[in-house]
């Protein structure tokens, strides 16, 4: 038992570190798209259009994520979780380093943005396969009574990665002149990813395969075509997973990414103001996401998730007025409370989505639900927010957009059963799983 607990802890630590590195790479691009890429890769356009184009290349990563989820989900359900996680980490790391080495538009012309899009697609491909495997390894190794907490640790990789990315670019921005930062300073955090990936690979090579997957493999119960089987046997679960995640994604990218563009571009404040607000909010999430994951183990996934969705829908109407004050403390307050509401949704989310699918289809089902929602939510959120701001001249339209997507999230929660008490060891549950009568 002690050995099993030790292995579970090792797997959870490996999942946390691995997802943190993956999200560091992914968010590094998003922050650089705001601060650098519009000038470096789209210099022939006026600033707002250049930012819009940079956001568009940023969205390519989200488009690639469902592809990665489908491809690596298939192999995760066929050959195992551990092997796929090693591959996804390598893909993400190589793509990020190549972005750091990429010459700008003045040097190689139109090839620069084209290669940027290619490397961004590879980033999305790697991340699309990463999330499902990291979450599944955490919940399939750990104590069934603590699945909400265990699955929340890979979720912590999001604020951890965001924190690392914002901090890395923030340090470069603060210590270098604007000319040096735009010339070469922004590249250092991208190149640093190569070192971090080596550390992540060393850790992942030391963990064991998921015991639930090993049991499926031993009993020769692996699905031949997991993606098709998910659509055929778990259609409601897949729809619920997508819907439940959409609003969470839109809220997050409004609160943690669009804020940087709005504070520096629209309000004309120093770019460090928005970055610092996100840094502080992300630091709070490091503690709060596991806390809300733990609460979901006690009170259920859906109640905790719902409280977060309602809170985010209310707070978004205070969020932009606080930014408009141009007061640094109030901007920080806006970001911190916004990211607290996100943590309430994000803490139970991983367990909630993964628990909807049987072991033989869980990698494909969870990855598809999570990553398809990423395209509908996070990929479009910065672009739609910027377009709404341009078209209406007011942030009220953005707030209403966030609320509409959060309503979709609430509908997704209503479509699904409470998953806290589901038996993950059941080899082939019914198409729509039912809870055990006792905990």
Image: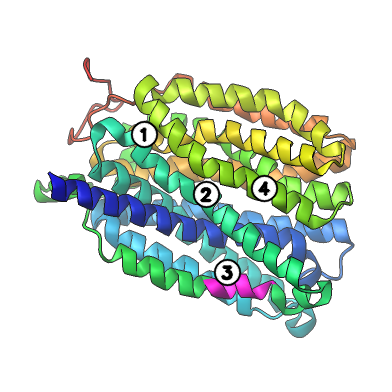
Q: Within 10 angstroms of label 3, few (less than 14), some, or many (20 or more) residues?
A: many
Q: Nearer the viewer, mark 4 or mark 3?
A: 4
Asked whether residue 348 is in view, the answer is no
Q: In the visual, does 38 lie left or right of 198?
A: right
- Where 182 sits versus 35, above or below? below
Residue 227 horizontal/vertical position (percent): 35, 46
Q: Where does the image place residue 62, in percent across and percent down from the top left?
A: 57, 52
Discs 2/3, front = 2
Taking depth in this image into account, of 55 and 196 the one nearest to the observer is 196
Q: CA distance from mark 2 to mark 3?
A: 20 Å
Residue under circle 1?
A: 148
Q: Earlier in the sequence, mark 2 or mark 1?
A: 1
Quarter of the C terminus within the rendering: top left
Earlier sequence position, callout 1 versus callout 4: 1
Residue identified by numbered label 2: 158
Left or right position of 92 against 186: left
- Circle 4 residue: 278
N-terminal label among 2 and 3:
3
- Look at 81% across and 29% down and name the residue there: 396
């Amino acid at each position: 038992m002690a050995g099993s607990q030790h292995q579970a802890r090792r797997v959870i630590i490996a999942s946390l570190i691995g997802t943190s590195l993956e999200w560091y790479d992914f968010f590094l691009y998003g922050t650089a798209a705001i601060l650098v890429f519009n000038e470096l890769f789209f210099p022939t356009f006026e600033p707002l259009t250049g930012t819009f184009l940079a956001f568009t290349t940023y969205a390519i990563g989200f488009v690639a994520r469902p592809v990665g989820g489908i491809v690596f989900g298939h192999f995760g359900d066929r050959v195992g979780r551990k092997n796929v996680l090693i591959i996804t980490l390598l893909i993400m790391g190589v793509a990020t380093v190549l972005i750091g080495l990429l010459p700008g538009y003045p040097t190689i012309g139109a090839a620069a943005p084209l290669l940027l899009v290619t490397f961004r697609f590879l980033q999305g491909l790697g991340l699309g396969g990463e999330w499902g495997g990291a979450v599944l390894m955490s919940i399939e190794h750990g104590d069934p009574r603590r699945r909400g907490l265990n699955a929340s640790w890979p979720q912590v990789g999001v604020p951890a990665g965001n924190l690392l990315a914002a901090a890395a670019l923030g340090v470069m921005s603060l210590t270098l002149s604007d000319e040096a930062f735009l010339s070469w300073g922004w590249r250092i955090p991208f190149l640093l990813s190569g070192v971090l990936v080596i550390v992540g690979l060393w850790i992942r090579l030391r963990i064991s395969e998921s015991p639930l997957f090993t049991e499926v493999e031993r009993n020769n119960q692996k699905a031949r075509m997991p993606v098709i089987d998910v659509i055929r046997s778990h259609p409601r679960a897949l729809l619920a997973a997508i819907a439940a995640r959409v609003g969470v994604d839109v809220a997050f990218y409004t609160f943690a990414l669009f804020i940087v563009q709005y504070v520096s571009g629209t309000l004309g404040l120093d770019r460090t103001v928005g970055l610092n607000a996100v840094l502080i909010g992300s630091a709070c999430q490091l503690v709060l996401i596991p806390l809300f994951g733990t609460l979901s183990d006690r009170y259920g996934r859906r109640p905790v998730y719902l409280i977060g969705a309602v809170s985010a829908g209310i707070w978004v109407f205070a969020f932009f007025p606080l930014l408009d004050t141009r007061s640094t403390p109030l901007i920080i307050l806006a970001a911190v409370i916004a990211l607290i509401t996100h943590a309430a949704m994000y803490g139970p989310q991983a367990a909630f989505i993964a628990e909807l699918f049987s072991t033989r289809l869980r990698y494909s089902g969870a990855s598809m639900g999570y990553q398809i929602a990423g395209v509908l939510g996070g990929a479009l959120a910065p672009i739609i927010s910027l377009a709404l701001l341009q078209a209406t001249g007011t942030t009220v339209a953005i707030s209403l957009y966030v609320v509409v997507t959060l309503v979709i999230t609430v509908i997704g929660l209503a479509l699904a059963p409470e998953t806290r008490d589901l038996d993950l060891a059941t080899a082939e549950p019914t198409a729509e799983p039912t809870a055990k009568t006792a905990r």
